[in-house]
Amino acid sequence: MRAIRVERFGGTDVLQVADIAPPVPARGQVLVRMHAAGVNPVDTYIRAGQYAKLPALPYTPGVDGAGLVEAVGADVADLRVGERVYIISSASGTSAELAVADAVQVYPLPDNVTFAQGAAVGIPYTTAYRAMFLRAQAQPGETVLVHGATGAVGLAAVQLARAAGLRVIATGGSAAGRARVVAQGAALVLDHHAEDIGPAVLLATGGRGVDVIVELLANVNLGRDLPLLAAGGRIAVVGSRGTVEINPRDLMAREAAVFGVMLWQATAAEIARSQAAIHAGLVAGTLQPVVGGEFPLEQVAQAHERVLQPGALGKLVLIP
Ligand code: NAP
């Protein structure tokens, strides 16, 4: 099968198309013929060798994706050959024609969701759900600030929040991105490159502040987020690319809390719970994954470059 192979960690030049033996599903695993593979920022951190957990070399990149079940290993009862599915996390890498994943990481893809959209579900929706509902315990009627709403996780957070009855304030870095977030039902969308979004957020909440912040770039924003929280406010830190200074008094005054979010910490039960909610939203159409760009497998290097550039418009996917 054709797959992307990485023989050594480095820049995008280490991403090579190769012909390799297809993976074989072990007990409890599923083999999926990939129709679309997700491109996530974490793929670039791993490829560069700058991530806490690195695969043994050589490896095939790509964590999430969508396709058709090609074969199932022993002890897999819930999934059938030919079924449309999405993968949250693959054991062999999704930037390939075929990928294996543990069955707990594979879920049915509703017929009203395309494969490209399906490749936007795994990491982004599961992370956004975990951040907002399992970590920050967001409640219907509360106001959430999605700080960095134009990308894959941010748009998922906006849709999940709207579907659950939260009011959404959001930010984006480009006019096109902000327009996309407005179309998802955010009440107010601000420019995160502007000098200070604080006054606009406080004005929009009658001076009270927001209940929850889903933070996509904490090293830039966390210090300025804290004064925007209402009493008892919670911040879920999803993304950060450096260090930041905060004033602990901003936390104390509001009895606020900051939660770290790491998708890989999710238990099988938590994953199953979040997929039940996500599946219901996909079927109902309240969740409609936004694809920001499609690339053929050969253009994986461009996709890895693009996912780190500003001007996000949704999730990037590879079409193997
Ligand atoms: P993405 O699609 O590339 O989106 C990146 C987002 O960050 C865009 O919305 C971008 O907005 C926004 N951004 C840029 N500058 C910002 C600023 N100053 N303030 C706020 N937001 C800003 O990536 P993604 O897949 O959504 O992932 C986003 C981050 O979450 C990445 O750092 C990723 O590694 C991390 N992540 C963490 C987990 C976890 O388990 N903790 C899981 C998934 C992702 P513009 O492009 O419009 O400027």
Image: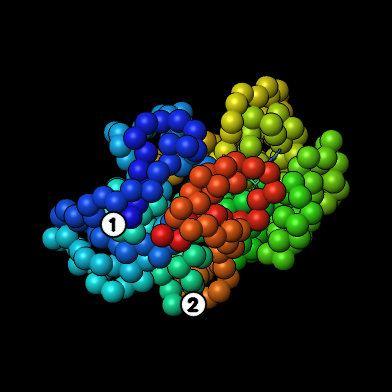
Q: Relative to 85, does residue 94 appear above or below in the rendering?
A: above
**Residue 142, picture quadrant:** bottom right
Residue 94 placement, left or right of 223: left
Residue 202 placement, left or right of 93: right
Q: Residue at x 61, y 23 (%)?
A: 243
Is the N terminus in the top left, top right, bottom left or bottom right quadrant? Answer: bottom left
Q: Which residue is mark 1?
A: 1
Is the C terminus in the top left, top right, bottom left or bottom right quadrant? Answer: bottom left
Label 2 residue SS: loop
Q: Relative to 47, does residue 244 appear above or below in the rendering?
A: above
Give the amino acid type for the residue marked by disc 2 in the picture: Asn
**Residue 60, picture quadrant:** top left
- Image spot of residue 145 (x, y percent): 69, 48
Gap in angstroms between the C-alphas marked 2 and 1: 28 Å
Residue 68 placement, left or right of 44: left
Q: Relative to 269, does residue 245 appear above or below in the rendering?
A: above
Mark 1, other Cα within 10 Å: few <14 / some 14–19 / many ≥20: few
Mark 2, other Cα within 10 Å: few <14 / some 14–19 / many ≥20: few
Give the amino acid type for the residue marked by disc 1 in the picture: Met
Q: Quadrant of ligand 1?
A: top right
Q: Please state which of the two labelled residues, at mark 2 or mark 1, is closer to the viewer.
A: 1
- Residue 127 seen from this side: no
Q: Which residue is nearer to you in this view: 103 or 18?
A: 18
Q: Which residue is nearer to you in this view: 110 or 61?
A: 61
- Image spot of residue 21 (x, y percent): 22, 52
**Residue 189, picture quadrant:** bottom right
Q: Residue at x 70, y 48 (%)?
A: 311
Residue 6 placement, left or right of 300: left
- Image spot of residue 94 (x, y percent): 37, 53
Q: Which residue is nearer to you in this view: 58 or 277?
A: 58
Cβ at disc 2 under 8 Å from ligand 1: no
Q: Which residue is mark 2?
A: 112
